[in-house]
Amino acid sequence: MLDLRRLAAVWPAVVAAVGAAGLLLLGLSIAGVDPGEAALTAWRGAFGSWSRLAVTASEAVPLVLCGLGAALALRSGTWNIGLEGQCLLGMVAAIAVLVTMPPGAAACAVGLLAGALAGAAWCGIAVALERTRGVPLVLSTILLNTVAAMLLGALVQGPLQASGSAAPETAVVPEASRLAMLASPLHVGAVLAVILAVVSWLVQQRTVLGFELTVAGRNPEAARFAGIPVGLRTLQAALGSGALAGLAGAVQVAGVTWFVSDGARSWGYAGIAVALLARLHPLGVVLSALFFAGLAVGARALERRMEVPHDLGVIAQGLAVAAVLLAGALAARKRT
Amino acid sequence: MLTLSGIHKQFDTAVALDGADLSVTAGTVHGLLGENGAGKSTLMKVLFGLLRPDAGSMTLSGQAYRPHSPRDAAGHGIGMVHQHFTLAPTLSVRDNCVLAAGRGLGLIDQHAWDRRILALGERLSWPLDPDAMVGSLAVGQQQRVEIAKALLAAGVDASGPLTGRMLILDEPTAVLTPPEVEELLPAVRRLAEAGTTVLFISHKLPEVLRICDALTVLRGGRTVYTGQTLGMDAEHLADLMVGAGRPGAAGRGAGAAVDAPVRLSVQALQVPGALHQVTFQVRAGEVVGIAGVDGNGQRELVRAILGLQADATGTIDTPSLPANQRLRGPHRIGVIPDDRQREALVLDLPLSENLALGDHRDSPLACAGWLLPAAWRLHAQDLVHRFGVRVPAGDVLAGALSGGNQQRAVVARALHGGPGLVVAVNPTRGLDIAASADVLGRLASARSLGTGVLLVHHDLDELLGISDRVLVLYGGVLVDSGWPSCERSVIGRLMMGLPAHA
Amino acid sequence: MNDWLVVILLAQALVAATPLVLAGLGELVAERSGVLNIGIEGLVLAGCLAGFATAAATGHPWLAFAAAIGTGSLLALAFGLMTVYARCDQIVSGLALNLVIIGGTGTAWSVMQTHGLTTMVPGSGFDRDWCGGWGVDLPLIGPLLFRQYGLTVVVAILALVTAWILARTRLGLIIRALGDEPDACAAAGVPVRRWRLLAVVGAGAAAGAAGAFLAIMRTNSFVPMMSGGLGFIVLALVMFGRWRVGWMISGCVLFGLADATQQHLQSQAGANRLPYQVWQVIPYATALIVLALMRRGRAGPRALGQPW
């Protein structure tokens, strides 16, 4: 069902992305940094050569997966802000499997699966709290994010700590259990992410399940009157989004870092930004993730070459989300 | 006292008022008549300061009157009671009055306000309890709070005169039961006799003829008649309101044949706090009407029949339709819900997807879990054509349709497959005469094809015009009124919980 | 008596509760008027940075507070314009706000580090003796009432004033009605959007001040992400208090007690056999458990989270 109207919905996202980048460059020029040089350095750092492209694409993989999870949740009307924590749980589960099972492709597959299940389970806790005790999902998922971070920190210093190491990090995943490399650091997980994006799109657009999820998200009452089991669908969407986030963490462990250490990550929140910029469209999520990854990698290059702090990338994420929101609000205004 | 001349108001391309005039004498009850879309609401909004007219003039007590806000209008002594109450149900009566009639941000003098409210209540012969939570009051009582609130905001004091004030009542009897209407109308006359001018907006001719001293009829944004009530008759007024001819009522059918199959059987239905031992049947080929004021269990009854009320106990049987196929499957119940925007349509989705909703799992719209988009387009075209839904070109969003066409779409979706049972709730809510007649006509056609129709409707006239049997729901208890062998007044009494015969 | 563990913990609880109550009062008023701001976490963090930076640069603590309040207000104004006037979704806007602030404070901190602005001028902080040291030795009420920061006393008074305004003045009535039935307010001639925006900006000011308290009173330092989830805890506490000032404060004090207890337990012998996260997680886990065990009582403002 591809038609002009849907294509035309893309322009706010593009405007938002360009606008956010533009604002940052403006800020840089005010701070005395040459915006042209900054833009060029960032662009080259992210997309300037095949090897840089591989770095950016690799960085985009967890963003694609978290973005798909966020899009799935948001489309069905579920406020899953807990992708962050679900991703961390996925990392924990994956590393636990990967360092304990005998090395090989089987361990890799099981590790990924364990990550997805762990993410789904962590989300399930929040959903259970909402359905049985009425705790709003927004609150419980946010609190569980912090709990997940602390859980990871404790495990990495405790049971999962690499023997003989004083640092809070786990053992390294044996080579046979890692995801194969396509072009270092881009790994096979990228293919998995793209496949999942296509599958998401097909399910959403072309299946009864996808249609029911969409209707349940937009108007649960009307969905009920049409015989759609709203409670079941939103549960499926929530668990699915948790699984995708968990998978994101597992893929990072099996494909890029090969061990887990205590430290801050932000794919979960970034995933929400990715999904919003893509207007919740699964294929758009791939492009949006590349954009955000490009921002991050470019910002790091900027830091190396021109001493500009890399947190600018995070500011860009926030500005992009705000821009998409405003564009959406403007469009809604025009309709009414 | 009040004169409006030549008021023009245009919204984009729609002309709402095209030179409307209104002239009201102080201390009288003046009726303003007209159908939906005639311009009554717009004229009132202009009078009350919510809208600025494009042209025309207004005078109040001989002086030019140009309000720029409702507060300003209230400052001139004009109060308005809207059709849809603007009360905060979680606040007390006193708080609602302070919110609307108070000034400034300072400390609330509770005793002073209580005195004002109680005194006003005494003057109107209505008991008003300042502490009561508005949400817990019956609709008729809430309306009294609305009126008191409007009067207080217009500057009526505990002991001061009610003269020099004007009260606009917008369709005040639309939400009341017949006994509550009997309480309101004399109170309105009392207000006028005490000196307050009342502007009574309604489309209910009998009431207007009863209590108004003079009246004005609007049609198409223009004044088509203004004059004394004495000597006017209902037929002439109706013609003035609607113009050329009126579509006939849908009419009663022959009723169900004696051996017609039972489509719906409800026995001892119990919903804690809402329904008590409800028992009735709907057979093929009949329309069973359920009369009653909103809030007496209708919502729970409909949801229980559809299987959406979790705490319902008792037996609900749809012979020839397994319980899990009531809302799914090709023979499912045709549902026309109460609130089309919140319970029937997804406004952000295209019309074709809305029309497919409910059929989207089955052939020909889907196959083994996959959707078939080409079939959806054909399905939508078929329904739009058969049921006369007026749509702009292309596949618009459901939200872009007018209210009447949205309802036609809902009716199309419910009736197109010739279901054995239809459950319709307030199917003509918010529709004009033509659209209402259309919808009721479709239900009557369905009946003649053998469908059993359960019609829950707040408009008693329309309900009586089409139902073969009428049951009354009050306080969760369902009673057979004996219609058509009983008087209309019997139904009114049952609706208020009074015994059928005095 | 003042050596008793209970007294020490309680006194510490009041200190910990101060920023919670401060930010909580602001968020409670904003939510009662119908706006849910999950960006409060970022606003607190912004207050931390602004307060610390000003204190480090100028050495004037009052100026630091003013800067923090101003920063919080400005950022909340942007959020308010987006959600109340442009009618953007409140949750997502809050997320965007958090992202922008996290990136912004990180950037600013990097810049500050390169310019050597990393420590506060000695003596530019506050001490825990708002009465100038008088009364700190009195039994029981000494440590509880007198060995506190001045801000704690200010916050206590602010709480009383807020509760009184909400319950007994037309201003409070307007705020309550805005969150339950904005249409009724509009019909009464109350400018709905203007008041909601004001409430949101006020909440931003309070959150900024709470952040400044963290930076220049409790810790005298700045660390990236030092707000540590305080904003999110406040959201939970407002809900726990069922949007009533009194209950919210008791929740804040209880939480402060849990925090003080956790810190105390960490410092005990044998505690370092467990990873420190086990102790740090106690307040969050407590918040979750309390929310889960709460009876499903009065729901929040009916129009909360919905653009008008």
Image (tube, coloured by chain):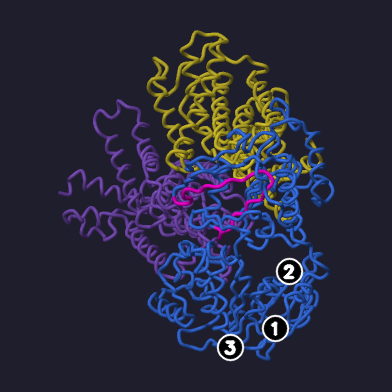
Chain colours: A yellow, B blue, C purple
Residue on which the image places disc 3: B164
Name the residue: 45% across, 84% down: B158
Q: Label 1 is found on which chain of the structure?
A: B
Please, what is the three-letter code of the amino acid marked with disc 3? Gly
Residue on which the image places disc 1: B229
- Report helix, strand or loop for mark 2: loop
The tag earlier along the polypeptide, 3 or 1, is 3
Q: Label 3 is found on which chain of the structure?
A: B
**Which one is closest to the eye, mark 3 or mark 2?**
2
Name the residue: 57% across, 56% down: C80
The residue segment tinted magenta is B273-294
Q: Same subunit under labels 3 and 1?
A: yes
Q: Nearer the viewer, residue C231 or B49?
A: B49
Q: Which of B386 and A323 is in front in this view?
A: B386
**Which one is closest to the eye, mark 2 or mark 1?**
1
- Report helix, strand or loop for mark 3: loop
